Amino acid sequence: MTEGNETVQPLRWTRSRPGESLDVNRPVVKAIARMIKAGERDGVRRLLRTWHPRDIVELLVQLPLKRARRLFLLLPAGPAAKVIAGLNDDFRAALLEDATIERLAEILDSLDAEDAAHALTELPEEVQARLMPQLREAAVIREMQDYQEDSAGGIMTRKLVAVPPGWTVEQVVAEVRRRAHLIKKLSAVYVVDAERRLIGYLKLRDLLLRPSDRSVSQVMRTDYVAVRSDMDQEEVVRVTLENELSSVPVVDADGRLLGRITADELQRVVRDEAEEDMHLMSRVSPAARPDDPVLSLVRNRLPWLLAGLMGATLSGSIVGAYQTQIAAAAILASFIPIVMSMAGNAGIQAATVAIQGLAAGTLWIGDLPWRLAKEMLGALLNGLAAATILGGVVVLAGPLVGVGDPVRLAFTAGLALTGVTLLAVAMGAAVPLILHHFHIDPAMATGIFITTGNDIIAVLVFFLVASAIYL
């Protein structure tokens, strides 16, 4: 690449590990950003012509969004399609926002039907409606969109090898070779009857070790585990973990084979579910994205903030109702943050463990009595330990700062702290299980029920104990 009479060395990208950003690539990012800003389209195209799609993906996510969109529009349809397939949902949606209908149709037609259907769901509904008639695989995509987005049918791929039981091992091997360019990773060959009902499967080792003239019916395995197309993706992950599967076939209500869910897709589901739970536990809408406009930020966050405000208002009302106790012993007010913090931390700890257990399938509603008893015993010991430490500090430091009757104050603070810890842990352990039983995402527990609820309980219990001891 030349610039005037000077020869400019081509910019090269140093590939990093996932989540890592290498300093050596920063000059490359800045140089390409300057080229995009200057409108050097041909120069950018020539530069990226030899780049691997994964390197282009890394470049895009490090560029400012405005520059990334312009760069994406410069890519030919083929490379653009490979780049789109490598992006996460949020960034893909943001990147495609400025693309024209014709450009989008060209890119989606370069993708496999499954990838195209997945990318299509990230676009606004009016854009989807305009795009659909222009897509070559519109019929297949519509069929896939009939499944719920978070169901097994919504995340499956139709790329698989299915054979009849009358074939020989030699014929199966030939079929695997014939379809090798379509399927990246193959862990099993499925066996189906004339109605395409799943009746067994073959592992790759079976194809290597069994005599080539043996029939599939003689060597196939029948201990398969399949999931229904309407099964929730979280349940699919649980099934695969319990059975130690790297992929799983998907069937309809009559047992007919529809597709399979790959290991890569299972990993994506685990990551997406963890991100969703993180949003809920942080009291942020799961629909929130880093590039959301201001109005979307307000829409996604305001309801959660208002719910927290209601809880804080109620906590404030409780404090106001105990003005007499505060007036009688003003030092009590300084312990309110301590008690509320202890309640929040203890409740979130218990809730987090419960949510993890539910996600792993090791907890259910029948565990509630036993789990509560175990958590309450632990909470009692933790509460007593914290109360002893707090009480000791009050007794020792009280005379130094002029606190009257430090022993009574220490007993009040310690007793309140222990009681609050017990109640907070009980709520943290029970609420996720109860929400899960009623098909509500238990991650919501830490967002509203635990954090806000425990603040209210902490203040109320503290002043009830203070009233009983001081008045």
Image: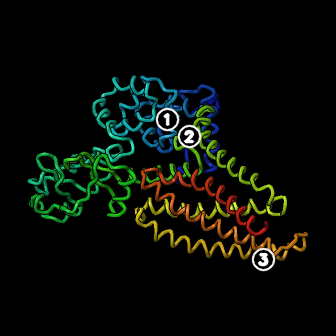
Foreground residue among 230 and 46:
230
Q: Give the mark nearest the N terminus, 3 or 1.
A: 1
Side of 138 where 405 appears, left or right: right
The percent position of residue 300, horizontal first and vertical second, equals 57, 38
| Residue 93: mark | 1
| Amino acid residing under circle 3 | Gly
| Amino acid residing under circle 1 | Ala
| Residue 392: mark | 3
Side of 55 where 310 appears, left or right: right
Answer few, some or many: residues within 10 Å of disc 3's Cα (few below 14, many 20 plus, some between 14 and 19).
some
The percent position of residue 184, horizontal first and vertical second, equals 32, 49
For mark 2, what is the residue?
289
Answer few, some or many: residues within 10 Å of disc 1's Cα (few below 14, many 20 plus, some between 14 and 19).
many
Q: Give the mark nearest the N terminus, 1 or 2.
A: 1
Foreground residue among 206 and 208:
206
Which quarter of the rendered picture does the N terminus lie within?
A: top right
The percent position of residue 307, horizontal first and vertical second, equals 61, 44
